[in-house]
Amino acid sequence: MATTTSPRPAAPPDAREQALGRGRPVGGFELWTWVFMRISGLLLLVLAVGHTLIMHLPAGGVDRINFGFVAVRWQSPFWRTWDWMLLMLALLHGINGLRNITLDYVHPPGWRFALTMAYYVIGFTLMVLGTVIVVTFDPTRWGPVG
Amino acid sequence: MAIRSRKSKSDYGSIYRGHEGQWSWILHRITGVAVILFLFAHVVDTAAVGWGPEAYDRITAAYDNPIVRLLELGLVVAVLYHSLNGLKITLIDFFPRLVSRIRPISIAFTAVFVLTLIPTAWIMLGQAWDLARR
């Protein structure tokens, strides 16, 4: 029997699968990424939604954001830590999301590998760039802050 | 339950998953991709602070445009939807018994999403309008 024409086994009618679309992997790397997506998602619910609402909704919205705004904001270790955690968790969560989608829709092994590697390279580069900027940023190089 | 310790092929083979959760599932994917693509650009534009006020203010001037502000509203809506729907997924995954109440839970999450959406859209459309009139 040709494997290409054999019917795909029907998905088991698991209620959670029907409701949400993705069951928990049984183990290994996929289980860890599955757990990571949920834990980081809970943290990002605070970090990303908080960041988005703080930046867009108060009077002036993003109009008030310029170099001086960032300089004052990043005087606080609290906001630098917030932004760094947001950077790392959002990139890891988003890169893994892209990887999941690619594994679902892209079947040729070469394309899968190339795309996944591209995500890893972009993600790693942006993590390094963002971390260097958040840690080393010193606005006093361009004059007094405030 | 779909058993996958290692992924090989899509379990279903097409976008259509054939059950009522498919719409929140596909919206979750679309909003997730939209947010991560913006994040790629956003990390780079924010990194411009490291090159001083002139560089940063010139790059972020790209956002001073009413059309871009509408895209920003889309971004905020995507973040809200993805976060709330993700919370729903996590809730059901960590407390599987709740799956028997998936319908009221989904309605509740949709209600919270819409109630958050209305003031957010009102404020951000106002900002875009102010910018367009300047």
Image (cartoon, coloured by chain):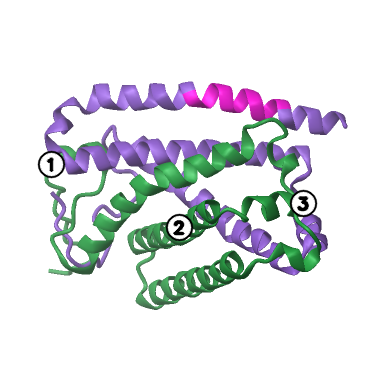
- Residue A6 percent coordinates (x, y): 16, 61
- In the drawing, does residue A111 fall left or right of residue A5? right
Q: Position of residue B46 (x, y in %)?
A: 65, 59
Magenta-highlighted stretch: main secondary structure?
Answer: helix
Q: Give the mark nearer the N terminus: 1 vs 2.
A: 1
From the top left corner, tell me how far across and down residue B121 is, in percent. 60, 27
Residue at image location 38% in from the left, 63% down from the top = A99
Q: Nearer the viewer, mark 2 or mark 3?
A: 2
Q: Is residue B12 above or below residue B17?
A: below
Q: Amino acid at mark 2?
A: Met
Protein chain holding label 2: A
* Nearer the observer, B23 or A50: A50
* Chain A on-screen colour: green
CA gap, disc 2 to disc 3?
Answer: 26 Å
Distance from disc 1 to disc 3, alpha carbons, whole Å, reads: 48 Å
Residue that numbered label 2 is attached to: A85
Tell whether B112 sits left or right of B71.
left
Looking at the rendered structure, which numbered label has been put on residue B62? 3
What residue type is disc 3 on? Ala
Q: Which of the image's four quarters has the N terminus of chain A?
A: bottom left
Q: Residues within 10 Å of mark 3 (few under 14, many from 20)?
A: few
Q: Which residue is mark 1?
A: A14
Q: Residue at left 55%, top 22%?
A: B118
Q: Which residues are magenta?
A: B116-126
- CB under 8 Å between callouts 1 and 2? no
Residue B15 visible to an observer of this rendering = no
